[in-house]
Image (tube, helix red, strand yellow):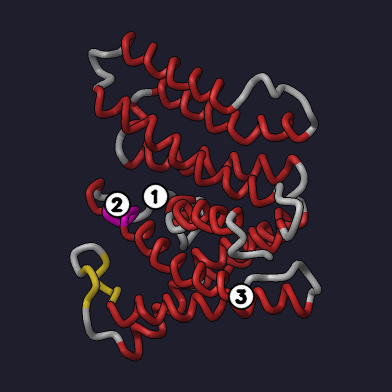
Amino acid sequence: MKTRIISAAVAIVIAVVLLILHNTFIFNLAIGFLSITAIAELFKATKMNTHTNAMFVCYAYAALDVIMPLFYKSGHLYFISSRLYFGLFILGMCLLFLKEHDKFKYTDFFFMIGVTWLLTYSFQTLLLMALRPKGSVFLLVISLCAAWLADSGAYFAGTFFGKTKLCPNISPKKTVEGVVGGVLSNGVIMLIISFVYDKILKGESVNYIGVFIAGMLAAVIGLIGDLTASVVKRQTGIKDYGNIMPGHGGVMDRFDSVLLVAPFMYYMTTQGWILK
């Protein structure tokens, strides 16, 4: 428990610093580190790290996906669009598939492309939020909280009212009552965070109805991400994806729910459901 608390405290300090630096290249580098580390953890868990050349092509694409926005922001290299370097990524993977087809199976080929695209896409939505002209820090905070805090509400609701097992073969401790409590509490917590930002910190006007709905939906979406990552761990026979955070596991262990919630929250933001 002491190790978990210390790790969490360090992570919070780092998160605060990154939020302060959200409009600098440091934030891009941090997101790139998380993205590449998560990809590496999944490749290691599924034994894809044996395809060394393909693995580094995936890392290169993930790195480009966080570096190129820095050039776009300063008005440079627009001709190297995301579609162009994604196409080059696919071309590189195809060439390696042809060269190493005796050991690089088609299932590995498509899996590595899919994992790389999914994780880079999800993490890049955090970068897109950081670039929003209004309420960027608020959007980052509320999106991460929407992914992470539902578990707390679900834990307490499940502890006091939990009777019906949700999916005992995947996550024995989760209950239907806990999920309902997590969904409702997440909506309320999002409202509280929004009220503090809007009224106390005098930030942008918030769409409270939209925030409440988004918070509840994010709890369900985050649960799906969490359970999906758990199934992968069970099928690969691992306890944690990594040990980058002692007592908490790896990046995938901490960001499994964020991978689905962040794109959802960004979509809700673009549709005017979060800020007016």
Residue at left offset 28%, top offset 78%: 176
Residue neighbourhood size for the residue with mark 1, other residues' Cα within 10 Å, grouped as few (<14), some (14–19), many (≥20)? many
Whether residue 249 is visible: no
Q: Is residue 48 left or right of residue 83?
A: left
Most frequent secondary structure within the magenta stretch:
helix
Q: Is residue 227 magenta?
A: no
Circle nearer the viewer, 1 or 3:
3
Residue under the point 78% across and 79% down: 200
Earlier residue among tags 3 and 2: 3
Labels 1 and 3: the sequence-earlier one: 3
Question: Which residue occupies the extreme bottom position in the image?
Answer: 160
Residue that label 3 marks: 208
Say left or right for 269 vs 39.
Answer: right
Residue 230: say if magenta.
yes
Q: Which residues are magenta?
A: 228-233
Kindly identify the amino acid type of the residue bearing the numbered disc 1: Tyr
- CA gap between label 1 and label 3 equals 36 Å
Q: Amino acid at mark 2?
A: Lys
Judging depth in this view, the residue of 276 and 160 nearest the camera is 276
Residue 241 is marked as: 1
How far, Cα to Cα, is label 1 from label 2? 8 Å
